[in-house]
Image (cartoon, rainbow, N blue to C red):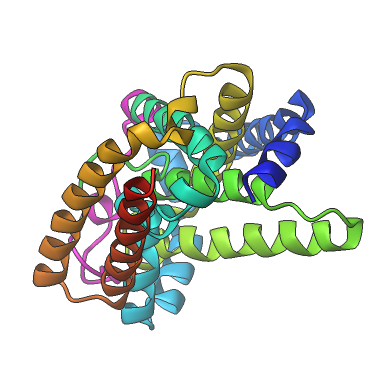
Amino acid sequence: MNKNVINNYSRLSASLFFIPIFLLTAIVLLLYSRDALCVNGYIQVQKDSFYYINHNLGQYPTLQFNLTQFGDALISLSFLSILIVYAPKIWESLIPGLLVSFLLSSTLKTIFVVPRPAAVFDNNSIIIIGKKLSGFNSLPSGHSITIFTILTILLFAFMPGKLEYKFIWFFSVIIMGLIVAFTRVAVGAHYPVDVITGCIVGYIAGITGIFISRQYKIFTWVNNKKSYPVFILLLLVCGIALVNKILNENLVTYDLSFASLVVSLYKIINTYAKK
């Protein structure tokens, strides 16, 4: 599996950055054409679409709240922890990709300082699922960046060889990512453009992570069994964090991610013991 991932990553070119940059430019131009590059204009131009998505998707609170957890790196990476053994090259890309995504998210949120929906709209008129977020860090959506960073790395890691399968795989992953990302609107945490922008930024961060892992050998230690004790310790810490989440909110997503973590922990310990 790891060899196939390496081969897939080796075929990627810098042209992959063109489409996301084009899309971000198009969003800026669209907002400019609607006089929405200021905070108030940005919010008002999305008011109707926010209410529409929030009220329609918000009719399924349990589903939306479970799905939105995948934008939490702790949850998503728990499901992928088994790949430390079977496809370490993916983790060599995930680590720099998530570091880049965190840097971009923090920087952009600091620059734009857009208030979240709960800080602007009457809370009785919108659906809020889970903890109410009312800060001034709405743009871009951090959860959307995280999920698309991870999905982009997986997208190219497992890209099929045949052209027709490539299209099916590509659109399936993108649609899955958008479904998860738009739960942020459903739970009342973000505006639609926050989410779309977050998806594009996450895609850029994911590609960047792949190129960093391909160009530099900074994270090749992931593929060394000597590093397994570090992962074992990290997984134990993550397990404790997940248990705490389960005790506070017993979501199916938490249960499944914890089960995945336990399986991965067993496999890594077993593999390390056989060294």
Residue at 25% from the left image edge and 50% from the top image edge? 235
Give the position of the C terminus as an image quadrant: top left
Corner quadrant of residue 169: bottom right
Lateral position of residue 166 relative to residue 210, left or right: right
Tell me if I can see residue 195 in this picture: no
Lateral position of residue 16 relative to residue 85, left or right: right
Residue 59 % position (x, y)? 38, 83
Residue at 60% from the left image edge and 45% from the top image edge? 152
Residue at 44% from the left image edge and 32% from the top image edge? 224
Q: Is residue 104 magenta?
A: no
Residue 204 % position (x, y)? 59, 33
Whether residue 260 is situated above or below residue 58 in the rendered picture: above
Give 111 or 273, whichever is nearer the viewer. 273
Give 148 or 34, whichever is nearer the viewer. 148
Give 172 or 48, whichever is nearer the viewer. 172
Q: Is residue 126 magenta?
A: yes
The segment highlighted magenta reads 108-132
Lateral position of residue 266 relative to residue 185, left or right: left
What's the magenta bit mostly, secondary-structure-wise?
loop
Whether residue 154 is situated above or below residue 56 in the rendered picture: above
Residue at 48% from the left image edge and 40% from the top image edge? 91
Tell me if I can see residue 74 in this picture: yes
Which residue in the rendered view is the most extreme toward the front? 274
Residue 76 % position (x, y)? 39, 56
Whether residue 72 is situated above or below residue 227 in the rendered picture: below
Residue 174 % position (x, y)? 64, 57
Lateral position of residue 228 relative to residue 4, left or right: left
